[in-house]
Image (cartoon, rainbow, N blue to C red):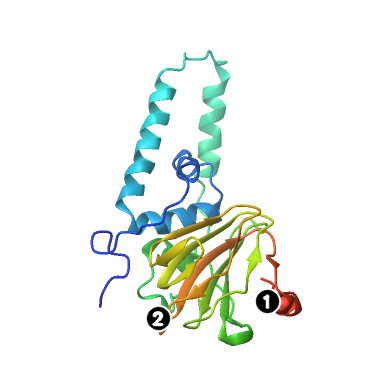
């Protein structure tokens, strides 16, 4: 079966802003953010290289920092903390990964194996959504399935929104997105996404605030579309 995330044959053309890659490389991204970036990196060789370069630059900066003098007791306290953290815990049983995830990138499949999900939520016009559990509840992570030729109505964003395409693709005012592509919408941005005809689109979506629909139909259906 063809791999939708082949970084050579189908290199992504839309990428995360550089500051997001830097946060990821520095380890300062949240769990949800790190998962989104890791999924894109799974498909994108150029962004993997950029993240590696950011990590190397950070290491070089640390090498230039003058050493600090620490109290002698700090070493023993650190060893005790390590010993406490190393105490054995109950083994975590991995969940079976659903068959429909077969072509999804490895970072997402690994996440789904560690954290069970609920059931698919049915939305108007044939859309379906699956909540992906993460530690930070303020960042809502969803798998969205959109039928071919359809998409969310015109809306704007009160907070940033991240999207990674898993299957199929979509088009909006900023371009056409295919598997592996990363779409970033900043606060105040607006767009109208339409899934590709035929197979439609499956995306992983990170939201922090509900979208603001800009048409009368969108405002009417908003209570049914909230994620």
Q: Position of residue 168 (x, y in %)?
A: 40, 75
- Per the rendering, the mark at residue 206 is none
- The foreground one among 187 and 35 is 187
Tell me: residue 118, above or below residue 113: below
The reply to whether residue 93 is visible in this rendering is: no
**Which residue bears the numbered disc 2?**
99
On screen, residue 71 versus residue 13, left or right, reads right
Q: Position of residue 88 (x, y in %)?
A: 50, 52
**Residue at point 46%, 17% (across, down):** 65
Quadrant (top left/top right/bottom left/bottom right) for the C terminus: bottom right
- Crowd rating for badge 1 (residues with CA inside 10 Å; few <14, some 14–19, many 20+): some
- The foreground one among 30 and 200 is 200
Q: Secondary structure at mark 1?
A: helix
On screen, residue 158 versus residue 151, left or right, reads right
The reply to whether residue 113 is visible in this rendering is: yes
- The foreground one among 74 and 222 is 222
Q: Position of residue 24 (x, y in %)?
A: 47, 45
On screen, residue 180 versus residue 132, left or right, reads left
**Residue at point 53%, 25% (across, down):** 76
Q: Which callout, 2 or 1, points at the residue further toward the start of the chain?
A: 2
Q: Position of residue 56 (x, y in %)?
A: 36, 32
- The foreground one among 190 and 60 is 190
- Crowd rating for badge 2 (residues with CA inside 10 Å; few <14, some 14–19, many 20+): few
**Residue at point 54%, 65% (across, down):** 205
**Which residue bears the numbered disc 1?**
225
Q: Secondary structure at mark 2?
A: helix
Identify the image quadrant of residue 211.
bottom right
Spatial CA span between label 2 and label 1: 27 Å
């Amino acid at each position: 079966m063809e791999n939708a995330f082949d970084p050579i044959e189908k290199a992504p053309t839309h990428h995360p802003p550089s500051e997001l890659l830097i946060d990821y490389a520095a380890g300062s991204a949240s769990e949800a953010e790190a998962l989104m970036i890791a999924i894109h990196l799974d498909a994108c060789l150029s962004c993997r290289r950029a993240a590696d370069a950011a990590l190397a630059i950070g290491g070089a900066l640390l090498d230039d920092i003058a050493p600090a003098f620490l109290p002698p007791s700090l070493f023993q306290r650190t060893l005790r903390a390590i010993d406490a953290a190393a105490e054995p815990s109950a083994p975590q049983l991995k969940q079976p990964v659903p068959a429909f995830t077969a072509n999804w990138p490895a970072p997402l499949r690994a996440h789904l194996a560690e954290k069970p999900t609920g059931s698919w939520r049915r939305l108007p016009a044939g859309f379906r959504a699956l909540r992906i559990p993460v530690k930070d509840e303020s960042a809502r992570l969803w798998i969205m399935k959109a039928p071919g030729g359809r998409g969310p109505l015109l809306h704007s964003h009160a907070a940033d929104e991240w999207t990674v395409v898993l299957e199929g693709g979509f088009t909006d005012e900023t371009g056409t997105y295919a598997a592996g592509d990363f779409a970033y919408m900043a606060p105040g941005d607006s767009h109208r996404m339409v899934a590709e005809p035929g197979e439609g689109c499956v995306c992983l979506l990170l939201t922090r605030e509900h979208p603001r629909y800009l048409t009368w139909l969108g405002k009417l259906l908003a209570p049914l579309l909230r994620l």
